[in-house]
Structure formats: structure tokens, C-alpha cells
Image (cartoon, rainbow, N blue to C red):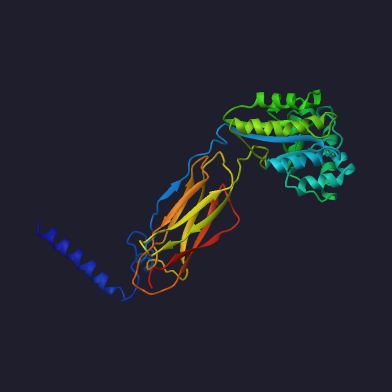
Amino acid sequence: MHRARIGALTAALALLLAALAVPRGAAPTSPASGVVASPVAAAVPSALVPVEFGAPSAACRSGLVALTFDDGPSASVTLGLVRTLKRLDVPATFFMVGSRVRSAPATARAVQRAGFSVANHTWSHQQLTALGDRAVRRELARTRREFTAQKLVATSLMRPPYGATNRRIRRDVRALGLYPVLWSIDSLDWTGGSPRRIAHRVIAGLRRHGTNVVLQHDGITNSPSSAKAVPLIVARARQLGYCFAALGPKGGVAPPRPVVRATALPGTEDGPAPVRIRLQLDRPTTRSVRVRLQTVSGSARAGTDFTPANRTVIFPRGVRTAWITVPVVDDDLVEGAEDLRVVLDRPYGVTLTRREVLATIFSDDG
């Protein structure tokens, strides 16, 4: 018992001596990590501010749809199709035949200039399984060279004509650094049919809660009808809760990547009323996305004029709006309007076009 008391007294004395050994004004360290704690952070802790989310959108609840078009470019069809897709705000991938790129280079460049993906559909649209390995690689490599000659930056995707492939063809394709892409829905536009009939085939083939890759053509005889079917397909698919998405770098359907924008409503010391920050996604998506938000001192000082915020805002699937409340501190100083910075970083699944906005705090002092 006596030894236990002596041990306890010794330990207490050691802690006291260690505390006295810290120079005056030195920042304390964490016993567990030895990391120096910031005196500013300790004096002005960031608040875990609440986040209010808007209601989930019905869009995207059913799944994703990727539109793809083969056999172009066609000087008579492709440009009109591009205008339609732009108006509807729908991405698409154009699997182009190399010899047709050579015949209509301006059309091919217009497709990419409009923001659509360009991919390899061989040089002469031959059935690859009927060709030897050297001929297969020549078909793909020649098209790739034509893309380069026409200043097209193509994706690493290719589509075998007629969907004809096997293990040997896939090996040849991969040897060139390309990824083969087939489809899950054939519009059968190549067999004929009116725009309404083509649209019906596509809609009937959609699989809920999955990814859908649609095959259409912009370089065949019935392509005018297939192009006119696009608005019908988009309207009905969106009505059913589907979103349109692009193909990813390896051929999978990539979820939409929204742009996030921040706007700030001013606060005031009268009340006080908080600063309100709105984060808005420009479109819904099928996955949870996030971004970090921080408030940084400007003429308004953290801890003196407002309680700083530093947190990751996670948008649930389908949600497009988040509101963050930053408390304002009332004081007795006579001062004008002051600003603080709202900084966004560390995006996941979203794109930042503007990383910083200013928020204003109005004073209630005369």
C-alpha cells in the first residue's frame, strides 16, 4: 500500500515537472501523437454547422442510359443530330468509321467541338472475326491515324462492326490499348422503321436500376429516322426516371458528374441573423457526391464576427441543394459591412468551376 502511494506521488510529480518545463507561450502537444496543436485553432474552433438538404429529385431514380451512334460521320445527318443532342443536354458517343472521317472531316471535328466523345469503329466496317490478326490491327490503327490527322482526340473505346467479336479479337483490340464496347439495347434502326417505332424499341428495352447502352446509327440509310427518334427517346426515358450519361474511359456508363456552385446570402449582427450558404448541383446523379466547405476570415474575423465552419457536405443520391448556416457574432464595435470567404475543395463526383465566393455580414451599429 505504502509503495503504491509513493508510486502515485512520483507520477504526479513527474507530470508537474513536465508541465513546468514547457516554455511560456509554447503551444501544447497532444500526448498521444506529439503533434503541436494550433493555438489559433484551439481559440477559434470550427463549428460542425448543420446542413439542410432539398428534397430528392425523381430524376435518375430508374437508372442510366448512354446513347451511342455508329457508322458516321454523315454530312447529311450527323450535324443535325449533334444540334438535337446539345439542345436536349444529352451526352453521346460517336463510333466513327475511319474512311468516313476522311470523307467528312469537318463533320467529325464538329462532333468533338460540340463536346461529344469520338471512338473507333474500324476503317472500312468489315466483320473483324473474318479477318486475320494483322488485318484487324490495321483496321483499327489506320482509323486512329486518321483521327490524329484530323486533329481529333479520340477516346480509348472501339466497337466491332456488327458486334462480331471473340477472344482473339479482344486480344488484338487490347494490344492496341483499346477497350471494346457493345450495347444492351439495339434500336434496330438498321432494319427500318419510323422515329416513333425506333423510340418504342429503345424504351421497351430499358432495364430499371441498371445501366443501358443504346445502339443507333448516324451513317446508314435509315439514320434520318433514327435521329428524329432521339427527342422521343429522351422525353420518355426522363419521364420514366432515367438519366442520360456518357461512356467512361473503359466503356462503362459513367454517372453524371454535376457542377456544384455556391451562393451566399448575407448575415447581419441584428438578431443576429446567420450567413446562409447554398450549394447547388446543376443536375441530379445516381450516386452520393461530396465537397468540402470552409469559411475563411476576410475583413470579418473568424471567432470575432462569425463562427467558422469546416465540414464535408455529402449530397445523398438525387439531392441537388444543400443549405449551410454560419452563425454571426454580435459585438459592440462600430463597423461597416464585412466579408468572409467561402472556399470549396476536395470534390468527389462533382466539378468545381468556381472555388470561392464572398459572404457579407452587415453591422447593426450606428
Work out which quarter of the rendered image holds the C terminus and state it.
Answer: bottom left
Among the 4 quarters of the image, the one containing residue 11: bottom left
Q: Identify the residue at image location x=74%, y=28%.
A: 166
Q: Residue furthest bottom?
A: 24
Q: Position of residue 147 (x, y in %)?
A: 82, 46
Q: Position of residue 173 (x, y in %)?
A: 76, 37
Q: Residue furthest left?
A: 2
Work out which quarter of the rendered image holds the N terminus and state it.
Answer: bottom left
Among the 4 quarters of the image, the one containing residue 123: top right
**Image-based side of 9 in relation to 270, left or right:** left
Q: Examine the rendering and report whether any part of residue 294 can be seen.
A: yes
Q: Residue furthest right?
A: 103
Front residue of this view, candidates 192 and 132: 192
Front residue of this view, candidates 103 and 31: 103
Q: Examine the rendering and report whether any part of residue 153 can be seen.
A: no
Q: Position of residue 320 (x, y in %)?
A: 53, 45
**Image-based side of 65 in relation to 159, left or right:** left
Residue 39 vs 80, above or below: the answer is below
Among the 4 quarters of the image, the one containing residue 232: top right
**Image-based side of 87 in relation to 13, left or right:** right
